Amino acid sequence: MRRRSVSYAKYGYLFSLPFVLAFLVFSLYPLIYTVVIGFTDLRGLAKTTFAFLADPFLNYKTMLQTAAFRLSLSNTAIIWVVNFIPQVLLALLLAVWFTNRRLKVRGQGAFKVLIYMPNIITAATIAVLFNTLFGYPKGPVNDILQSLGLIHTPLNFPLQGWTSRYVVSFIQFWLWYGNTMIVLIAGILGISPTLFESAEIDGASSFQAFFRITLPSIRTIILYTLVTSLIGGLQMFDIPWLYQFGGPDQATMTAAVFIYRQAFSGSYLYNRAAAASMMLFVIISIFAGILFYILRDKDAIVLNKQRKALIREAKAAAKLAGEGAAT
Amino acid sequence: MKREASIPRGATKTVIYVACVFLSLLSIFPFWVMFINATRGTYEIQQSSIALLPSSHLLDNVRILLGKSFNPLTGLMNSLIISCSATLCAVYFSSLTAYGLAAYSWKMRQPFFTFIMAVLMIPAQVAAIGFYKFIYAIHLTNTFWPLILPAIASPAMVFFMRQYLLGTLSLDIVNSARIDGAGELYTFNRIILPIMKPALATQAIFSFVFSWNNFFIPLILLTDSKKYTMPIMVSLLRGDIYRTEYGSVYLALALTVLPLFVFYFALSKYIIGGVALGALKE
């Protein structure tokens, strides 16, 4: 028996090997390489040789002193917050409506399909499409606003910084609230129905049920949504880049757009872009660490503790027995 | 209950339906404008950019579009090759790794799983500079390999597949296959993979969509227009050559959306189910 179990263990390693190899070559190595480049003078298209800088953190210092980099971080934060808060509120409201057993909303399936739909469409296409929709002086959005009498002269959307930020936020919101809604619905459906039934018997109103049962029960899922959205938001590139190329006047220049511009245009400052990437990586790692902590395998931890306790007991018993034998 | 009764349920429901219909229209509206305007001439669009019914300039738009750098067939083929290959790699090797984690007892199993959990959230984008320089050094820019092979290591999918296997895999099947003299890889290919079909299908859909919509990595790696993927083709529309050709820009966008629409509406049940499942994996 023992011989057989030993011979099968090798398949665990063998079957994980392709994953490990691909990870080492295509994820870990590029990551380390990026770290290294961040400490060098590597710049210029097609250049592959580089030397380490006398002051290893020069690129980091230069980046932190670059106004555009700090602006890109604050742009990313603004665009993310303006998109996330309404996104999670609307998703929560829809999730509560769709899961309410007393309301029994009809046509839910169709509503979900349509509301989720934008999430599946290529972000690059969405960005170019919205650039066309918000055209000036003629464009569908301007036409609608004028025919509704909300404005008299067409608005020059592409030229206004704050408007462009809001449009990018709106696109992100529009792409993702359906996804968040479905995630939250799954969370609410996972709550034991008996909780709601007993609340109903006790005469709780819908509001009380929401704040006392629904919200506390889906806390983890909301946190999960928050952190995954944050990690995705910190890398936001497709929409701001293809909507306005980070403009006008750097108003929609997110951190990813900034890094792309540093590395792949102008003087190809790979070293500075690498340093900026690493700072972004640290920020993302902190948030990912929080998520990792939330999602850690709680059952496994409990089992592990129990196993360790058992081993300790067994050892203690053996020790006692040994002492007994000695005396 | 009493407070509830003071707000008539009919009124609440009306609000809900109005909101849902509005949001559904909000989802459709941009695409509807796009499809209609794809059939309208640039002059018509300049007169009024929204119309209810299609017009007759579809062929003119096709001619203008194809006369320039946008080549939808090339983009479609390249995207299909990359997305299908990447999906196959991701699905097969993730299942294999997950099976290795679920079915065998080996010393590094728990540390390896913890490691997968830890790298779950590492975004490819922060390592893009090193990735680009590495691919450049081994002369693989303008090839599809760097867009396909990294899919072999998909931590999130391994995580999902492992959860699925832990719930469905019975080691009795594996043992009886062993008694019949089947090799371990044979058992995986012929017995385990079929059991995993529902999970494979869901994960394949998301892997495919992710690969199809990927923009950043192809953007930095592909400079040869014959290798452009669909999203890169789309980015050409933001260039000066299409500045005033509204009709053909809408048509080009419509061509990139159409395959996804067919795909989505055919599989929407599984896609939405998959999103919900993904949420519950913790």
Image: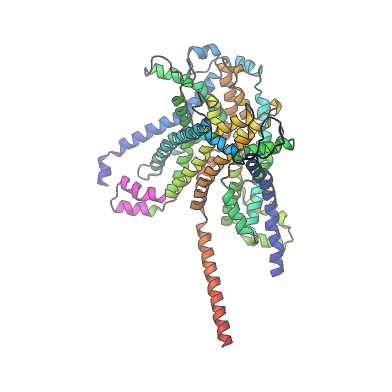
Verify whether residue A199 appears in magenta: yes
Q: Which residue is pictured at 67% across the width and 40% down the height? A: A52
Residue at the far bottom in the pictured view: A327
> Which span of residues is magenta-colored?
A195-218
**Residue A149 at what x, y percent from top left?**
37, 17
Q: Closer to the camera, A318 or B186?
A: A318
Q: Closer to the camera, B125 or B194?
A: B125
Say whether residue A155 is left or right of residue B246.
left
Say whether residue A177 is left or right of residue B78.
left
Verify whether residue A313 appears in magenta: no
- The picture quadrant where one finds residue B167 is bottom right
Q: Is residue B2 above or below residue A72?
A: below
Q: Closer to the camera, A92 or A294?
A: A294
**Residue B238 at what x, y percent from top left?**
58, 22
Q: Is residue A306 visible?
A: yes
Q: Which residue is pictured at 65% across the width and 52% down the height? A: B97
Q: Main secondary structure of the magenta part?
A: helix
**Residue A130 at what x, y percent from top left?**
51, 25
Q: Is residue B280 visible?
A: no
